[in-house]
Image: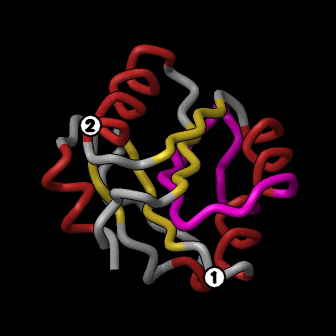
C-alpha cells in the first residue's frame, strides 16, 4: 500500500514514538492523525474516515483490539505495532500484520496489504 494521499490513524501511547511515526507518515505523503490513547483513537475513528491505521497493541495497559475490530469493519487497512514481539492475539485478529518495535518505514510499508 502506498501511503501518499491516504489518511492514516496512528495510535501510540509513547509520545516520542508517536511523533517519530507521524513524521515517517508525513515524509511518505500521508495525512497522519495521531492519538495517544485507546479512547482518543476510538473517538477519531468514529469522527473521521481513514484509509489505514497503525495501532500500538498495548495502550497504557489497554489493548487496541476493540479499535482494530471497528476499523476493520469499516474496511480500513490495519497493522499492529508492538514492543512485545509476536504475542498471541485473539483469533479474529490473528491475520492482522504486525511490526515489532523498533520499526522503520520499510517494515511498515511491507506490512500493509
Judge the density around disc 1: few (<14), some (14-19), many (≥20) Cα neighbours within 10 Å.
few
Viewer-closest of 111 and 24? 24
Q: Secondary structure at mark 1?
A: loop
> Which circle, 2 or 1, is nearer the viewer?
2
The correct choice, above or below, for 15 with respect to 89 in the image is above
Q: Nearer the viewer, residue 91 or 14?
A: 14
Whole-percent x, y for residue 93 in the image: 56, 77
Looking at the image, is mark 2 or mark 1 earlier in the sequence?
2
Q: Residues within 10 Å of mark 2 (few under 14, many from 20)?
A: few
What residue would you read off at disc 2?
Answer: 27
Looking at this rendering, what residue extends furthest in the left direction?
Answer: 106
- In the image, 22: left or right of 1? right
Q: CA distance from mark 2 to mark 1?
A: 24 Å
Q: Is residue 72 magenta?
A: no
Where does the N terminus fall, quadrant-wise? bottom left
- The disc placed on residue 75 is 1
Residue at left offset 41%, top offset 49%? 30
Q: Is residue 47 covered in magenta? A: yes
Q: Quadrant of residue 20?
A: top left
Spot occupied by residue 88 in the image (x, y as percentages of width and height):
46, 66
Amino acid at each position: 500500500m502506498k501511503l501518499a494521499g491516504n489518511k492514516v490513524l496512528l495510535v501510540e501511547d509513547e509520545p516520542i514514538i508517536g511523533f517519530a511515526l507521524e513524521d515517517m507518515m508525513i515524509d511518505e505523503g500521508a495525512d497522519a492523525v495521531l492519538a495517544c490513547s485507546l479512547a482518543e483513537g476510538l473517538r477519531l475513528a468514529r469522527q473521521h474516515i481513514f484509509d489505514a491505521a497503525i495501532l500500538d497493541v498495548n495502550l497504557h495497559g489497554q489493548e487496541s483490539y476493540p479499535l482494530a475490530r471497528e476499523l476493520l469493519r469499516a474496511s480500513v487497512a490495519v497493522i499492529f505495532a508492538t514492543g512485545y514481539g509476536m504475542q498471541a492475539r485473539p483469533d479474529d485478529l490473528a491475520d492482522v500484520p504486525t511490526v515489532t518495535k523498533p520499526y522503520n518505514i520499510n517494515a511498515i510499508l511491507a506490512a500493509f496489504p
